[in-house]
Image: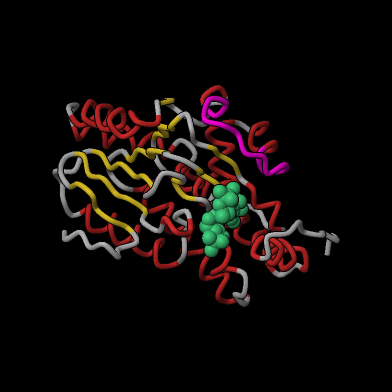
Amino acid sequence: MAIMEEEVVKIAAQGAVTELVINRPQTLNALNADVLNSIILAFEKLAEDPSIRVVLITGAGEKAFVAGADIAGMADLGPRAIADYVELGQRCMRTIENFDSPVIAAVNGYALGGGLELALACDLIFASRKAKLGQPEVNLGIIPGFGGTQRLVQRCGIGTARRLCFSGELIDAEEGKSIGLVDKLCEPEMLLEDVRKYAALIASKAPLAVRKAKSLLRQAHAVQLLGGLRLEIEAFLELFASADREEGMRAFLQKREPKFKAV
Ligand code: COA
């Protein structure tokens, strides 16, 4: 596949270990519909290549893995358009989760909101010591909409999910490791190398067995997850229609503190 400078999702290396880069560094790799569609397309394409054993996902630039859903792109969407967008986000995350072979998130900086949800849809999360992770949607008058309320509980338990979703606080990678959110902590300059080494280890194992293990581990929570994802979309859309959401997003874009009124 050709690598073009303007692509929002680049395939940086293709082989047994294939590397995808989310490439919108000017917005800290925020997930607009173009990026979400490009991730889906990339995985559909990769699914046709049985020689792929592991996929690595990282973010372009020094600062961010992905700083979330695209707030500027979302702020003015009407009810139908936001429903389409959040459905697309969930479909994107499910495409990654359902990919036959393991996917590793190489979290090189901020993994916030939709960015953390992207990491949570991956099988393993490796993070640079410089990374910051969180679900800061409450600052905007919304909640996670790309599966975070469900996958965070599955990965870290209800206590951590409550803390991150209620407070919007950002935690560092070391704390992420201590609560089971991050699987491996890496020195920033070693992150990609560490992930590549680990991916090569997985790639050296029996591929059918690894894929079957992924599929079965996914089934462990599948029924609960599907029901929960539906509820999450409904709640997200309800909040998106609120005055506080309007205020939260305006305040972010105008670089000021929001004034919430619970309406
Ligand atoms: N959507 C759209 N644009 C975003 C974005 C997002 N989620 N996150 C960052 N950006 C943009 C900023 O608006 C800014 O654009 P500008 O240069 O045109 O002003 C650019 O990316 C750089 O971000 P900036 O905020 O200036 O960097 P910072 O180092 O001061 O702060 C963050 C970094 C990650 C703490 C801050 O950008 C942030 O809080 N982002 C939003 C996180 C969030 O709420 N995510 C959940 C969304 S549902």
User: From this viewpoint, which residue is outermost toward the right?
Assistant: 261
Q: Position of residue 59 (x, y in %)?
A: 39, 48
State the residue at coordinates (55%, 44%).
224
Q: Is residue 144 visible?
A: no
Query: Residue at horizontal 55%, vertical 75%?
Result: 81
Side of 258 relative to 261 (left or right): left
**Is the residue 211 above or below the residue 24 in the image?**
above
Q: Which image quadrant for residue 128? A: top left
Residue 44 percent location from the top left of the image: 27, 58
Front one among 220 and 160:
160
Is 52 left or right of 77, judged from the image as shown? Answer: left
Residue 175 sits inside the magenta stretch: yes
Q: Over which residues does the magenta segment extend? A: 164-176
Quarter of image, ligand 1: bottom right
The C terminus lies in quadrant: bottom right
Image quadrant of residue 208?
Answer: top left
**Colouring scheme, one of rainbow, by chain, secondary structure, one colour:** secondary structure
Residue 87 in the magenta stretch? The answer is no
Q: Residue at x 69, y 36 (%)?
A: 163
Q: Nearer the viewer, residue 253 or 133?
A: 253
Side (left or right) of 87 relative to 5: right
Magenta segment, prevailing SS (helix, strand or loop)? helix
Q: Is residue 183 above or below residue 146?
A: above
Question: Image quadrant for the N terminus?
Answer: bottom left
